[in-house]
Image (spheres, rainbow, N blue to C red):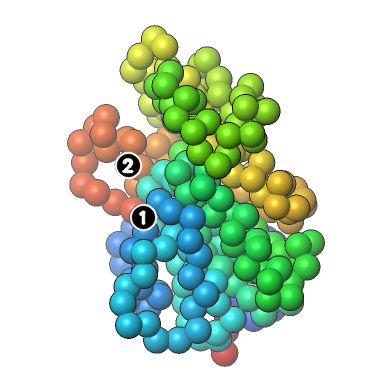
Amino acid sequence: MAWYSRLLADIPGIRHAFLDVHESAAFDKSLLVDIKQVHGADVLHFTGKMEQRPLVDGVLTSLTGQQIGIVTADCLPVLMASRDGRLIASLHAGWRGTAKGILQHCVRQFVDRGVAVEEIVVAVGPHIRACCYEVSASFYEGLVQTPARELVTANRTKLFFPAPIRPNAQSAVAREKTSQWFDLPRFCLLQLAQAGIAGAQIDVMEKCTYCAPEVLGSYRRRTHIPATKTQQVSWILKEK
Ligand SMILES: [Zn+2]
């Protein structure tokens, strides 16, 4: 199965999918622009052939017929497009890349290429949510050492919780008494808001990777329950 965004599906000439583990395993990754994801904030503007495999976590292109995408297992897979279908982008946004500003960098690339901020559409696929994303008490201290310091301190109570949010039978069991639960998607949405993207321009698939072992790979779940490594592929394409 796969998940789709209404906002992206409404753009003529754009195809996309957030694949589950089974479809991802069968997907031919050589179709995608080959990047090495490094939890950074750089977004490659892809214009054609590359000499070396770039160390980036996002790709933006205006080329037709070239699939771009990312591989994730808990981090946010983010797909973006301009409403006129001229530009598309794919991003891998974990807490590190998000803190370093990958979402803002990508929005800036659209704007630098003549797309108004309100003409950008953003779709977020399955990721780990605050039902399962337990972090140590010191995680907050690390986060305020990043460029996101101001945003994090101003929104601390919206981002960190003393107990898991909306846990269910499949959620991760708490490991430590002093832990907190981090709302990674909220962190990304706050960054997008700061970049000028309104809520109506964003689709979020509120499916937790940890909570869905039958269809989604979760890095965190594998650290608790040893299992074969599985990941999700998310892709977007401008049709010829
Ligand atoms: Zn969960």
Compared to residue 218, the image places residue 162 above or below, namely above
Q: Position of residue 63 (x, y in %)?
A: 55, 84
On the image, which quarter does residue 56 sit in? bottom left
Q: Which mark is residue 38?
A: 1
Compared to residue 63, the image places residue 223 above or below, namely above
Residue displayed at 45% across by 86% down? 48
**What is the secondary structure assignment of the residue under circle 2?**
helix
Within 10 Å of disc 2 (Cα), the crowding (few <14, some 14-19, many 20+) is many
Q: In the image, is 187 to the left or to the right of 86? A: left
Residue displayed at 76% across by 62% down? 117
Q: In the image, is 67 to the left or to the right of 204? A: left
Q: Amino acid at mark 2?
A: Tyr
Compared to residue 55, the image places residue 62 above or below, namely below
**What is the secondary structure assignment of the residue under circle 1?**
loop
Residue displayed at 36% across by 64% down? 55
Residue extending furthest toward the top: 177
Q: In the image, is 47 to the left or to the right of 37? A: right
Chain-order first, disc 2 or disc 1:
1
Rendered-image quadrant of the C terminus: bottom right
Rendered-image quadrant of the N terminus: bottom left
Residue displayed at 37% across by 78% down? 31
CA separation, marks 2 and 1?
15 Å
- For marks 2 and 1, give the one nearer the viewer: 1
Q: Is residue 30 visible to us here?
A: yes
Q: Position of residue 12 (x, y in %)?
A: 69, 78
Q: In front here: 233 or 82?
A: 82
Q: In front here: 238 or 143?
A: 143
Asked whether the beta carbons under mark 2 and mark 1 sit within 8 Å of each other, the answer is: no
Q: In the image, is 24 to the left or to the right of 192? A: left
Q: In front here: 229 or 160?
A: 160
Q: In front here: 162 or 127?
A: 162
Q: For mark 2, what is the residue?
A: 219
